Amino acid sequence: MHEDQPTRCGTIVLAGRPNAGKSTLLNTLVGTKLAIISAKPQSTRQRVIGIRTDGESQVVFVDPPGLLEPHYLLQQTMLDEAVEVLSRADAILHLHRTSEAPAPPLAELVPKGALGKQAVATVYTAADSAAPQIRPETGADVFVVSAVTGEGIDELLAWCRAHCPAGPFHYDPDDMSTQPMRFFAAEFVREAAFELLHEELPYSLAAHVDEFRESSDPVYIRVTLYVERESQKGMVIGANGRTIKSLGALARRQIEALLGARVYLDLWVKVLPRWRTSPHLLRELGFRPPATRKQ
C-alpha cells in the first residue's frame, strides 16, 4: 500500500429483480462462492456480504433479496431487507439480464423514496448466453458482463472502486465476509434443496443451524430443515432417506470448500406450519419482519 495514495472503502449493492444474476456476479466479484446459485428465482432471502480488498481499495459488496412483488410476509420481509440495504449504499449496481434488455429504471422497481443520490450503474448480466444483436451499448455507467467468460468484470470493478469514498478500510484485508460460517452453512443447505427438490417445495423450506462445532474433526454441523406440511417432510426425506442423503452430500461439499475442512453434516426435518406468514416464527428463524425493523 502506497503511503501517498489514500485508501478507499465503500459499500456497493447489487440490485435487481429476482433471477437477474446477482448472486453469480457477487461470487465473481469477490472471487469466492458465498451466495447460493439457483435457476429458480427468489432463492436469496437475506443479504449476503462479500469483501474484496485490492491494494488501496476495499469494496464491500452486498447481495440482497431480489426486488419482487410481495404476496406474503416472508416476501415482504425480503423486499424490506433489499430496500434497507439500498438506502445505505455508497453506489448501486442495477442488474438486468442481457437477453431481456433494455432494463427498466431502477426507481420503478422500488418503493417511492427508497433511492437516495447514490451513483447507479446498469449492469447487463449473462452476456455469454444472449444473442449478439440484442447486446446493449456500453457506456460510462452501463456494463455488459459475463461471469462465465469474465467479459466486463475488470471494467465493472474499476467503476466500483472509483465510487468508494476515500477512507480507511472497515475490515481486515484478509476478510471475505462479515457473516459467520454458520450462516453460509444454512445457505448451502438451502441451495441443495433448490437443486434437488421440485416445484414449490424449496420455497416452503427454511434451514436453521442448531449446532456448529468448528473445533471438532470433522467439523460437526447440525441443521434443522423446517417445512410447512407433513407431506413435505416425507418428500424432503425421500424413500429410505435417499433424498435427504443426497441433499446433505451436495451441501457438505459446498461447506467444506468454503470452510477448508472436513464436515459432518447432520440434517433433521421438522414441520413448522405457516412459518412464512408468522412474524413470531420468522423472528425465530433469524428474519426481521416489518414490525421488528427500526424505522
Image (cartoon, helix red, strand yellow):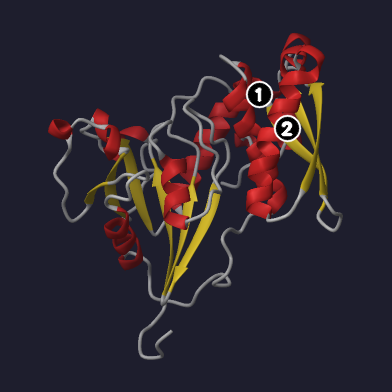
The front one of 283 and 40 is 40
The front one of 6 and 245 is 245
Q: Is residue 253 above or below residue 279?
A: below
Left-right relation of 21 to 232? left
User: Which residue does the numbered mark 1 point to in the structure image?
Assistant: 276
* Amino acid at dot 2: Gly
Left-right relation of 162 to 264? left
Residue 269 location (% of width, % of height): 80, 24
Residue 210 location (% of width, % of height): 82, 41
Q: Quadrant of residue 196?
A: top right
> Which residue reaches farthest bottom?
3
Label disc, if present, on residue 248 of the rendered structure? 2
Using a 10 Å C-alpha cutoff, classify the residue at mark 2 as few (fewer than 14 neighbours), some (14 to 19) or many (20 or more): many
Residue 68 location (% of width, % of height): 44, 28
* Amino acid at dot 1: Arg
The front one of 204 and 188 is 188
Q: Quadrant of residue 159?
A: bottom left
Q: CA distance from mark 1 to mark 2?
A: 23 Å
Quadrant placement of the N terminus: bottom left
- Callout 2: SS: helix
Q: Quadrant of residue 58?
A: bottom left
Left-right relation of 236 to 196? right
Say which residue appears at 29% left-offset and 33% top-offset.
Answer: 129
Q: Earlier in the sequence, mark 1 or mark 2?
A: 2
- Callout 1: SS: helix
Residue 91 location (% of width, % of height): 36, 56
Say which residue appears at 12% left-offset and 32% top-offset.
Answer: 133
For residue 227, say whether it is visible.
no
